[in-house]
Image (tube, helix red, strand yellow):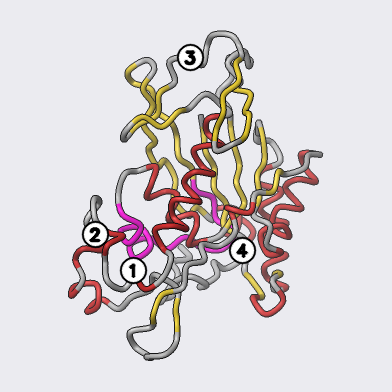
Amino acid sequence: MKLIMIRHAEPDYSIDSLTEKGFREAELLGKRTADWKVTDFYCSPLGRAKKTSEPTLRHHKKEATVYDWLREFHAPVDNYEKPGETRIPWDFSPKFLDENPILFDPNHWWEAPILKTGNVKEEYDRVMRGLDGLLAKYGYHRTGHYYSTENTKSSNYFMEYNGTTIECLKNAPKVEPIIVIFCHLGVMLTMMSYLLNTTPATLLHGFFIPPSSVTVLSAEERTPGEAYFRCQVAGDTSHLKIAGEPVSYYGGFATPFNG
């Protein structure tokens, strides 16, 4: 399986859409994806993600399945810099991170005092249930720190997942599924942290994923029946470089590399 996550193009957050530049980015992205052999498309319900997906879906003559859990990760916490206000549960200062090393503890990160001021763990669990339910449709079942694929080559079957009956596609043609998800920076990096078995803080503070960029995770099955996700590409914007379109700075605190 190839799991391709695409961050929305340059946003106009005030109207939950794209800037003029963002629409150019989305069109360039659509041209890039035109010859991809995509199995299925999925999308956040938010406008900026939907607008980004439109040129790609037009090229493929397909529609995307919309899931609410793919919306931007929303779990406000207390703002330690401005008491009485709330903030997103990342973009913490280096000093704050140094004072709260529990944020980087894979087994206890959700117990960090700042995260317990909001519903971070509950929202995290909700998103990961959605992600695991999606992967289960293609025969990937979370087993500890990896995904079991032992039954993906036998007959189709149905399973109950989170109250929903899911048909697992075991009889699908023996072609590697390519799944494309249009979503947002926070939820994307949080999902990646789960797939890579690290903490959200590690990726949220360690990776800049530009608008309209392409991130690819591959499910490697070196041992038959046991798949582990590895990031092959992170935040690639070659479609912008080829067209001479600058990389947008949204989501970072330094000028993005445009070389």
User: What amino acid does circle 4 point to?
Assistant: Gly
Q: Secondary structure at mark 2?
A: helix
Q: Nearer the viewer, mark 4 or mark 2?
A: 2
Q: Nearer the viewer, mark 4 or mark 1?
A: 1
Q: How many angstroms separate mark 4 from mark 2 (CA)?
A: 38 Å
Return the disc, 4 or 1, that comes first in the chain's sequence: 1
Magenta stretch in the rendered image: 199-215
**In the image, what residue type sits under mark 2?**
Phe
| Residues at marks 1 and 2, CA–CA distance in whole angstroms | 15 Å
User: Left or right of 250: which side holds 81?
Assistant: left
SS label for mark 3? loop
Of the two numbered discs 2 and 3 on the same chain, state the one appearing first in sequence: 2
Looking at marks 3 and 1 on the same chain, the residue that comes earlier in the sequence is marked by 1
C-alpha span from label 2 to label 3: 35 Å
User: Does 209 lie within the magenta span?
Assistant: yes
Determine which residue is flagged by label 3.
151
CB of mark 4 within 8 Å of CB of mark 1?
no
Mark 3 vs 4, N-terminal side: 3
The amino acid pointed to by label 3 is: Asn
Is 161 part of what is drawn in magenta?
Answer: no
Residue at numbered disc 1: 116
Give residue 69's position: percent from left, percent from top. Answer: 58, 53
* Residue at the disc numbered 4: 244
**In front: mark 1 or mark 2?**
1
- Using a 10 Å C-alpha cutoff, classify the residue at mark 1 as few (fewer than 14 neighbours), some (14 to 19) or many (20 or more): few
Q: Would you say the residues marked 2 and 3 are in contact, meaning their CB atoms lie under 8 Å apart?
A: no
Q: Name the quadrant containing residue 97.
A: bottom left
Q: Which residue is mark 2?
A: 104
Q: Position of residue 249 (x, y in %)?
A: 50, 73
